[in-house]
Image: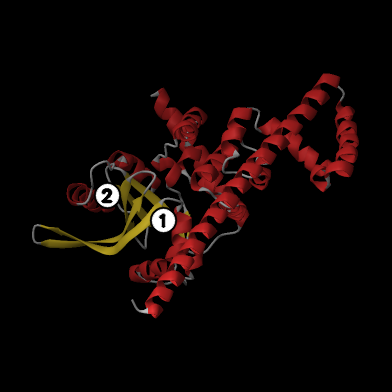
Amino acid sequence: MNPSSDNMDIIRSEAGLAADVRAMIEQTREAVARTVNAGMTLLYWRVGRRIQVEILKNQRAEYGGEIVSTLSRKLTGEFGPGFSEKNLRHMVKFAETFSEGRIVSTLSRQLGWSHFKEILYLKDELQRDFYAEMCRVERWSVRTLRAKIESMLFERTAISKKPDELARAELAALRGEDKLTPDLVFRDPYLLDFLGLKDRYLEKDLEDAILRELETFLLELGGGFAFLGRQTRIQIDSDDFYLDLLFYHRGLKRLIAIDLKLGDFKAEYKGQMELYLRWLAKHEQQAGEGPPLGLILCAGKKTEQIELLELDQSGIHVAEYLTALPPRELLQQKLHAAIEISRARLEAGKED
């Protein structure tokens, strides 16, 4: 046998061994880091809970400040700045906000202390639960979580527009069964300011810009989306149709057809999307998948038309897209108004 060949085999074997051992070390480090992170998060919750019980037992408001300050001085001297007065107050807030240790234990497998601190001070309970569960399921970094909150993701999902009891039921299903629903996945509006489009552009310009910035577009769509193709050809009888964008959502286990429109929504768009979805169901849907869903992205919506067409019964969602962001206060007002109107309509529908 050629000596040089023997040497190459030895080199390859050593390289393979080194790669395997390196992977073992990295996997163990990550597992240890996750375990330590979860343990510290649970510790902070337990500390906050213990302080909370002590304060309630004494029944004096000023005692809370005294005990936190005194305890902080003792702990920082022994265990370092992680138990500063400010951090102890965070821990008390943590225990107040997330009162069930069982839920904290589950969330802490994916969420670290820094995640919880981003969520703690959100005012709305549903909002907090939404971000905590979506962060767990989609494994957001702290930076991503912060960006999602800043972009008002909760207010842009359909679940925020539902009555509290229905929204809580969906979040409970997500917590207990990791069950995603379209109302947790789709947003309205979609913020596409990163595309860099000017005042006047064509539909093709919008599609081209999305494909250029596909990674950022996928982040805006949310976790679980996989890009399958553009201008997918659909041949029916002797006619050809072309679907703008086709995705697959791993959590929903469904194909997602996206149609891009420059102007306001028109009623005729429903028939076009229904045709696409039925063709996809017949020719592309695989065993174990749910029926395909459609998303019509428009520059503007016609709310009453959309409501009368009952698009949700056809698996079709309509959403606006914004290529230039308005001031945050204006966007916030618009979203909150949409939430109130939608909830009022749902309540009125229940009464009927």
Decide: few, some or many residues near mark 2? Use Cα within 10 Å; few <14, some 14-19, many ≥20.
Answer: many
- Can residue 239 be seen from the camera position used here? yes
Q: Image height check: is 178 above or below 244?
A: above
Mark number, residue 300: 1
Q: Which residue is mark 2?
A: 270
Q: Give the residue displayed 37% in from the left and 56% down from the top.
A: 226
Task: Identify the image quadrant of the N terminus.
Answer: bottom left
Q: Residue at x 79, y 38 (%)?
A: 89
* Residue 260 at least partly seen: no
Q: Give the quadrant of residue 63.
A: top right
Relative depth, front residue between 149 and 79:
79
- How many numbered circles does the render carry? 2
In percent of width and height, residue 197 lies at 46, 70
> 60 left or right of 119?
right
Among the two numbered marks 2 and 1 on one chain, the one whose residue lies closer to the N terminus:
2
Label 2, label 1: how far apart the Cα atoms are: 15 Å
198 left or right of 307? right
Coloring scheme used? secondary structure
Image position, residue 313 (x, y; %) = 30, 38
Comparing 21 with 282, the one in front is 21
